[in-house]
Image (tube, rainbow, N blue to C red):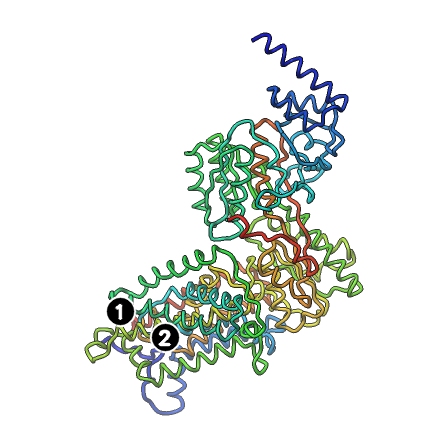
Amino acid sequence: MTAEPSTPIGRPEPAGGGGLALIGRLAAAPLARLAAAYLLLAAVFAIAADHFLTTDNFLNIGRATAVFGIAALGLTVALIAGALDVSFGAVMSVCGILAAERIAAGDGAAAAVAVALAVGVGLGLVNGLLTAVLRLDALIVTLGTFSIFGGWAFLHTNGAPTPASDDAFARIGRGETLGIPTPVVIMIAIALVLAVVLRWTGFGQRCYLVGDNPRAATLVGIRAAWVRAAALAISGLTAAIAGVVMVANAGVANAGEGERQLLNAIAAVVIGGTALAGGSGLIVGTLLGIAVLGTIDNGLNLLGVSSTWQDVLKGVIVVFALVLDRIRRRDA
Amino acid sequence: MGQDVRRRRAAAERLVQDLETGAVSRRQFIARATALGLSVPTIAGLLAACGDDGGGSTAGGSTAGGGTAISSSGGARGAEAVAAKVYPDGITSDPEYKGPNGGSRVAFLPPDAYDGTDEHGIRRWVCYDFTADKPYRIAFAHFSAKWDLSVEMAARAERAIKAMGCEPLIFDNNFDADQAIKNVDLIVQQQADFVVEAQIFPDANKAIYKRLEAAGIPSGYFAVEGPDGALFEDAGNLRMCTALGEWLGEYARDNWDGQVDLVMLAAQPRAGAYVAEREVGYRAGIKKVLPDLPDSVFVEFDSQGLLDESQKKAADVLTAHPDAKTILGCGSNDDAAVGIVRALEAAKRADTAAVAGQAGQASAVEELKKPDSPFKVSAFTDIETVPWLAAIGILELMGGEVAPVNFLPFYLITSDNVGDFPPQAGTLA
């Protein structure tokens, strides 16, 4: 087993006493540093951009990030278990299209969502089974299935958009729950569930162990391949939910739409501190990563900065996060 | 041999006399002259000398380059000046117009240029009404097989090229500049006589043009411009979006007494100068109706032509303009326009907003069906007109003079007439 990082995200903090020691530990914690960085970012925008510090604006940020955010949460679980899932964008497209087809067939929102979620879990399990049975790296498997699922979406629709006009279905993407955009509520609910699963269930703990050192996990009796398969199924489920929200918002499903969420979702997970090699990470970190990306877009929009510069800046932040991840692992 | 020549000459002289006296129509003249074996320049010269058949095509103006062997059965409608000699009946031209490539000569296909329906019940377009003088190989490289409208364009182009007596070669550019350039090698290998390029990268079009030019193959570009002076066809971003801008301006004038607090322009700055003409058109159209509108109310953002991206950016623009009540939205395409609509709805500011888009995308069709939607108008181009560029290429191969910039008709679609517009996909492919 590798040596434990001094303050890894997703691991218990080392014991210690006293208020000053606690502040010191917080300052050294990656999550606390990320939160501090986010607050600094928000403070800069609050000063520089009028209307940044308003409730409506933060709801805008939530709305703008919910689709890739939901996918990023499931991806976090897979990545913690050491399975980088790059097929989730294609899964989003497939599930969104199937949901739209159910709507078009007059089956109603509940049936459309049920079909999409079932297929999402199924496709995640396909990834997981291929990884487990063939003992292949998840990245390789999901690269292949990304192409297969995405290609199927185009073949199935012939590239044609599928309208999804149903009021109940549309509320999933455009409605509000207790004054908060429904997609944001869905994202927070998923985050809470996954945080509990990772922190307080045996499965969650096994994800960390398998991601950190699969051989050691196997030696202590954990079926590492099946843990990863389950984690990939969770990633498929959240991709399906993201796909449903995406189509419900747009009112139309298009093949290829989900794939565009790939970079943002992976960036959010990486910025949130989840190690690309697996074994560490927290849902709250991914939430912060999502918030960072959304806030950068929003703040720069309010300041009138061109989207090209926004892309450059986001790229710099992702590279910076990866460098930090590497340094952290090297120090560990 | 000599007797045959004399007989044909006599027949030709009688035909010319018939044309002069009006005993034969212009169309009949072209058909008979072609059968007699008269050359294209000769037919064009005779037509220019003898005037029209009263069906609407007018002679006169420059005829450099001669005419074409057009055996038109459609009604001649309003052709004039230069194009009267070089295009099938029904096409007009504007010698004064400045096109996006700087071309001073632009041809228009007017909305009434159709000629009935074919055996499949599909509207038959004027380009089917002439036959090439030999079976040219016409390549049509379309945007992507992953886009239903592109598949439909290719299918209709294939049908039109065959109907004009030529051999179609269809290629899939797969929304990929590299693939489009690789296709050029295949096109050269298959010895195409003319190439219609439909792909989305302006710079790749320049590379494609150079490769084809080196191989001696003329080419034309659809929707995204080629290099300056290259043959080009589109609905015309500037004129189409100017019309949409005028529509929005009139809506504001009629419903809000001309008071507009904010105009959101969902642009696509990365798509090149020609696409940028959409925003120029929107501004010009709105200002034409509301000349006193200050420039400060116009806010442009990069939507990338995508619904979700446009929605995010529009939401931020609305946040930055909390006091704006009467709002106009201008989408670079329909998806971008629907993105503005979603942002307005989320901000609960859709009641005093009017949004326009263009292209006829599915998102617009769905939105226009809702009578209460702020999405008020879109400009649709009939996909059936796309093969015109193949017809223009064939005309050029036949020695006809063609305008460098060619505009297709477009239709302003609102909730009142969205149900009347013919389906764009699924009818042929």
Tell which residue pokes out farthest to the front in this image.
Answer: B119
In front of the other: label 2 or label 1? 1
Number of marks present in the image shown: 2
Position of A307 with respect to A258 (left or right) is right
Q: Which mark is residue B175?
A: none
Residue B82 versus residue B178: which sits nearer the camera?
B82
The chain to which mark 1 is attached is A
> Which residue is depicted at the point 35% across and 71% down?
A232
Tell me, yes or no, whether dots 2 and 1 are on the same chain: yes
- The spot of residue A164 in percent (x, y) is 54, 66
Residue B17 figure quarter: top right
Give x and y (percent) for residue B384: 59, 45
Q: Eyeballing the image, is B318 above or below B89? A: below
The quarter of the picture where the N terminus of chain B appears is top right
Most foreground residue, B25 or B76: B25
Circles 2, 1 touching at the beta carbon (< 8 Å) = no
Q: Is residue B153 left or right of residue A329?
A: right
Residue B147 left/right relative to A54:
left
Residue at mark 2: chain: A
Q: Secondary structure at mark 1?
A: helix
Q: Is residue A176 above or below residue A297?
A: below
Q: Amino acid at mark 1?
A: Ala
Rendered location of residue A261, percent (x, y): 46, 64
Q: Quadrant of residue B75?
A: top right
Amino acid, disc 2: Val
Query: Where A177 falls versus A75 (above or below)?
Result: below
Point out the tag, 2 or 1, that comes first from the N-terminus: 2
- Disc 1 target residue: A132
Give the labeled residue for mark 2.
Answer: A77
Residue at 39 percent across and 84 percent down: it is A196
Secondary structure under the numbered disc 2 in the rendered image: helix
CA separation, marks 2 and 1?
17 Å
